[in-house]
Image (cartoon, rainbow, N blue to C red):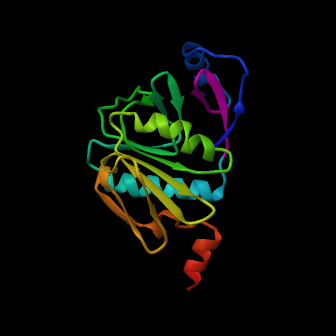
Amino acid sequence: MALNQPHEDDYVSEEEYLATEPAAEQKREYIGGRVYAMAGAGYNHNCIAANVLGEFRNHLKGTPCATFMADIRLKLGKDYVYPDVLVDCSKMRGDDVFSSAPVIIVEVLSRSTRKTDTTTKLIRYINLPSLQEYVLIEPDIVSVQVLRRSKNWLPEYFFLGDDVRFESIGLTLPVEDLYDRVDNPDINEYKAV
């Protein structure tokens, strides 16, 4: 989802954010004492996030791991964000409203979120003790970047024709499966051949 400018210029306490978030008209992230309204995402973004969710959920059926898409908050210390997709293998309960122990987080990049996803969130995510992989997917070109704890968070890149391994959940997928129904020049050219 797209991240807008801060909703308010003044500092907001964590307690204030948590008290007002359930009644907010749109989702809002809380980073460094500032509230950011989440704008809607486009077609390609939603297709990719849904593809990842579906593949992960089907693969993890019958395991303790649960896959969530965009509507469950992730607690990062005193910050709260809504990753596009995350997998949490801890024992979450029915009344839980946030995850604090994801093993993998996927963000579909956009013009408005790229900077935050690749800087602020990256630093916070890789400091989560539970996190094993952080995945960044481009919607307008075919490019999947995977950062893994096991590789000291050094990025690996995957493109059309490659298989990407999600080590934290034991799943390997062709890159093109992540881009099913996506409309961008790379995937359109690939399908035409």
- The residue shown at (31%, 43%) is 65
- The residue shown at (49%, 40%) is 122
Residue 34 belongs to the span the image colors magenta: yes
Residue 71: image location, x then y, percent:
52, 38
Residue 84: image location, x then y, percent:
52, 45
Residue 28: image location, x then y, percent:
62, 30
Q: Quadrant of the C terminus?
A: bottom right
- The residue shown at (52%, 53%) is 49
* Nearer the observer, 152 or 99: 152
Q: Which residues are magenta?
A: 26-40
Q: Quadrant of the N terminus?
A: top right
* Nearer the observer, 14 or 70: 14
Horizontal side, residue 7 vs residue 60: left or right: right
Q: Quadrant of residue 35?
A: top right
Residue 92: image location, x then y, percent:
34, 31
Secondary structure mostly taken by the magenta-highlighted segment of the chain: strand
Is 11 placed above or below 133 here? above
Horizontal side, residue 104 vs residue 17: left or right: left
Is 136 placed above or below 21 here? below
Horizontal side, residue 110 vs residue 126: left or right: right
